[in-house]
Image: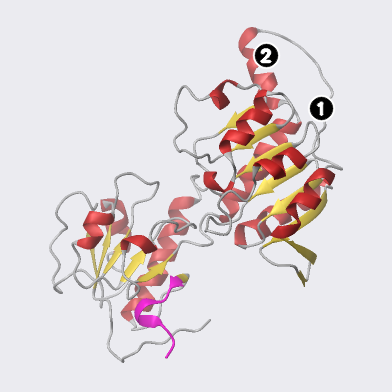
């Protein structure tokens, strides 16, 4: 979708970034934009052009940015460093644009999804525990080749997961919000999940979190999965019913390899930590060495576009760039 300004004025003159490193990497991106440091927890750096117009949120959560954003009287744009933006619209008015870092994390999150699947399906987690005990124990595991994989989510990261699964010779079924056909074949609607789940060995979840997807992988869906099946979640924790998943894994019926969970972080005494059928990583899907150069490239592009009076990319809430 193409967006254009409601007026011919340039809506952003000052943009804040949450780290000094980002400021130093981006300070020369556009002569028309002041890039200043603001971590949202202290006073922002002074800006030569007046008030703050755009804010880049910190990466990886942390303190609630709501009070800081509320202190900006004419906030034009909020830029996330994550693909997801759940919770951000509630912090700003509909007149404020929201842009995401879609694409920045796609490769890294896709490789973790496939890595988690392989680790579980090849018993790498078991081998690590045996190594710590000095135990040599061979076992035939299912592996990834010939597994029937249900991919829930066909957006940018879903496409990258699909690409990385192709060399592993899986039987892939895809699920999106609605049924449709594309260049890769058929996409089933999410309403078909209960019917599809019994016929797949692995479910990989990478759908965004929304009202429609919260609890999408429900107790019913988990119960429909065949004995010994694996759930991989690299989306958001709340897409999966954590209590139901914990019960299934604790019973030894299902396995789980998850990068996200609800609640997050998982409490240290949570039963899921103790299950041999679970692999848990601490929401690190996009957090690799690829993150820094890719986020700098995206933010540099955004600043250049804003400096030219153009619309930023990856808008999920148009704000002043709404079509008229």
**Badge 2: residue crowd in 10 Å (few <14, some 14–19, many ≥20):** few
**Badge 1: residue crowd in 10 Å (few <14, some 14–19, many ≥20):** few
- Determine which of the numbered discs, if any, sits on residue 130 in the image: 2
Classify residue 73 as left or right of residue 85. Answer: left
Looking at the image, residue 15 lies above or below residue 229? below
Looking at the image, residue 308 lies above or below residue 225? below
Which sits in the foreground, 40 or 16? 40
Q: Position of residue 22 (x, y in %)?
A: 32, 56
Disc 1 is placed on an element classified as loop
Label located before the other in sequence (1 or 2): 2
Span highlighted in magenta in the image? 316-324
Disc 2 is placed on an element classified as helix
Which sits in the foreground, 225 or 274? 225
Quote the CA–CA distance across marks 1 and 2.
15 Å
Q: Residue furthest right?
A: 146
**How is this picture coloured?**
secondary structure
Splitting the image into 4 quarters, where does residue 179 fall?
bottom right
Which sits in the foreground, 15 or 289? 15
Splitting the image into 4 quarters, where does residue 118 fall?
top right
- Determine which of the numbered discs, if any, sits on residue 53 in the image: none
Q: Position of residue 153 (x, y in %)?
A: 65, 57
Q: Position of residue 87 (x, y in %)?
A: 40, 56
Do the residues bearing badges 1 and 2 touch, measured as CB atoms within 8 Å?
A: no
The quarter of the image holding the C terminus is bottom left
Classify residue 278 as left or right of residue 210. Answer: right
- Determine which of the numbered discs, if any, sits on residue 141 in the image: 1
Q: Residue at x 18, y 70 (%)?
A: 73
Q: Residue furthest front?
A: 220
Q: Residue at x 36, y 75 (%)?
A: 304
């Amino acid at each position: 979708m193409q967006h254009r300004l409601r007026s011919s004025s340039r809506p952003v003159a000052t943009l804040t970034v949450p780290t000094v490193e980002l400021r130093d990497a981006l300070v020369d991106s556009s002569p028309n934009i002041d890039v200043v440091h603001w971590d949202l927890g202290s006073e922002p750096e002074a800006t030569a052009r007046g008030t703050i117009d755009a804010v880049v949120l910190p990466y990886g959560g942390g303190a609630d940015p709501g009070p800081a954003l509320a202190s900006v009287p004419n906030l034009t744009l909020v830029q996330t460093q994550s693909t997801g933006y759940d919770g951000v619209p509630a912090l700003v008015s509909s007149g404020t644009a929201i842009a995401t870092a879609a694409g920045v994390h796609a490769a890294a999150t896709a490789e973790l999804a496939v890595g988690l699947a392989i680790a579980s399906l090849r018993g790498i987690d078991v081998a690590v525990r045996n190594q710590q005990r000095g135990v040599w124990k061979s076992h035939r595991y299912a592996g990834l080749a010939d597994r029937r994989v249900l991919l829930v989510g066909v957006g940018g990261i879903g496409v990258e997961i699909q690409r990385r699964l192709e060399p592993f010779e899986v039987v892939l079924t895809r699920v999106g919000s609605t049924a449709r056909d594309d260049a890769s074949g058929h996409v089933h609607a999410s309403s078909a999940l209960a019917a599809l789940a019994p016929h797949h060995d692995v479910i990989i979840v990478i759908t965004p979190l929304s009202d429609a997807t919260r609890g999408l992988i429900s107790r019913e869906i988990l119960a429909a999965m065949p004995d010994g099946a694996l759930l991989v979640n690299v989306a958001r924790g709340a897409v999966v019913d954590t209590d139901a998943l914990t019960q299934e894994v604790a019973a030894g019926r299902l396995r789980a390899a998850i990068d996200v969970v609800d609640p997050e972080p998982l409490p240290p005494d949570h039963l899921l930590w103790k299950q041999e059928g679970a692999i848990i990583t601490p929401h690190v899907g996009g957090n690799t060495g690829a993150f820094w150069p890719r986020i700098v490239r995206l933010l540099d592009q955004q600043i250049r576009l804003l400096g030219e009076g153009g619309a930023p990319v990856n808008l999920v809430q148009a704000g002043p760039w709404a079509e008229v």
